[in-house]
Image (cartoon, rainbow, N blue to C red):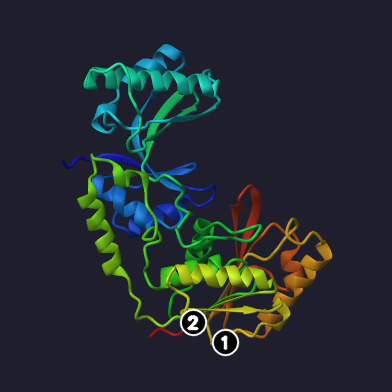
Amino acid sequence: MSRQLELIATAPMGLESIVARELKDLGYEDVSVENGRVNFTGDFIDICRCNLWLRTSDRVLVKMGEFSAVTFDELFEGTKALPWQDWIPAHGEFPVEGRSHKSQLSSVPACQGIVKKAIVEKLKETYHTEWFEENGPRYVIEVNLLNDKALLTLDTTGPGLHKRGYRKHATEAPLKETLAAALILLSRWGPHRPLYDPCCGSGTIPIEAAMIGWNIAPGLRRSFNSENWPVIGEELWQEAREEAFDAVRDDIPLQITGSDIDGEAIEIAMAAAKSAGLGKEITFKRLPAASITPEGDFGCLITNPPYGERIGEEKEIRKLISQLGRVAAGLPTWSFFAITPTKQFEQDFHKKADKRRKLFNGRIECQYLQFLGPLPPRR
């Protein structure tokens, strides 16, 4: 069954335009951006493709409906009017999550209960039963109330898209894979250029770069809630996965290196790269930032240097930034990119950034500082 669906790719704060660009690159034209989400339309196959391919989005949702809801009766009737029976089978599990902001219906648990009750009543009419076992495929429903308007969605993803499936362990303050991919996409790096991360931690930036360089769909090594939905079916998921496997370009030579002063972090990074099938494509070294010697011309140094909570001493942080500045001074053809909450980064780096972009690492407000070197000659 083919149908036009209203879909939503959720986006971390500050990355909406990157998610929109990804969707356009995947061929979606009717893309509109709002706070925290990017709206687009597609078919069932597009649910599969977007879950497999989106690097910077958190998850892919189906928009079930949107309506005014000032009272519980309005929330109940608006929810019941939606076509839940087209998606949820009789044995489906359908938990309801919720949030409310600037709305008269401010009790999230109460709203969740009303939505659940309305969906049960709708499914009773379809399946002619008074009891639902909920022991089948999982359909996570969210009611999002904003300014007295209710948005009802179905989550097709499951665990967030940053969970790529290649990482078994992480360091204490890991960079989310979605944010790491965004840092790379915002830089001017391409697989024909060297890439170096001198504070690589558990290796997220180098691994995400290698996946981008080889055009590996980030969701190839994981599963999704909607893989078990009868309305989509196994054939479409298989088709989307085969397309993704065929798109891999593993014949491109990569020059990607990560280093860190923490030996345990390097071991974790090497294990993750191996799990991702990239163990031989990325070089990891245990080195202090002052000792790194990036090789090649027109490279990109992209990093998430330690700050506050990870080191604890401002003096050490400023010393590290100064060391990175000295490395930069010796690499005139390279470009440098750092995400940091440190206000005096440019002062300690001894250079003014060419571009700045506000991003959030978790809940920490940061600046993505971009020190742009010359572009490589055209081939």
First reached walking from the N terminus: tag 2 or tag 1: 2
Is 341 displayed left or right of 120 in the figure?
Answer: right
* Residue type for callout 2: Gln
- Residue at the far bottom: name it: 296
Residue at mark 1:
295
Label 1 SS: loop
* Placement of the C terminus among the 4 image quadrants: bottom left
Q: Quadrant of residue 286?
A: bottom right
Observer able to see residue 153 = yes
Look at the numbered disc 2 and give the secondary structure of its residue. loop
Q: Residue at x 54, y 65 (%)?
A: 204
Answer with left or right where residue 293 lies relative to residue 148.
right
Mark 2 in CB contact with mark 1 (< 8 angstroms): yes
Q: Is residue 371 visible?
A: no
Numbered marks: total:
2
Residue 237 vs 374, above or below: the answer is: above
Cα separation, mark 2 vs mark 1, equals 9 Å
Does 324 sit above or below residue 154? below
Residue pictured at 27% horizontal, 18% vertical: 124
Where residue 90 appears, as percent x and y from the top left, is: 27, 28
Q: Residue at x 34, y 22 (%)?
A: 119
**What residue sits right under mark 2 in the picture?**
255
Q: Quadrant of the N terminus?
A: top left
Where 357 falls versus 82 (above or below)? Answer: below
Residue 334 rendering spot, x and y as whole percentages: 57, 80
Corner quadrant of residue 2: top left
x, y (%) of residue 110? 51, 19
Q: Residue, x 36% and y 32% (percent of image)?
A: 93
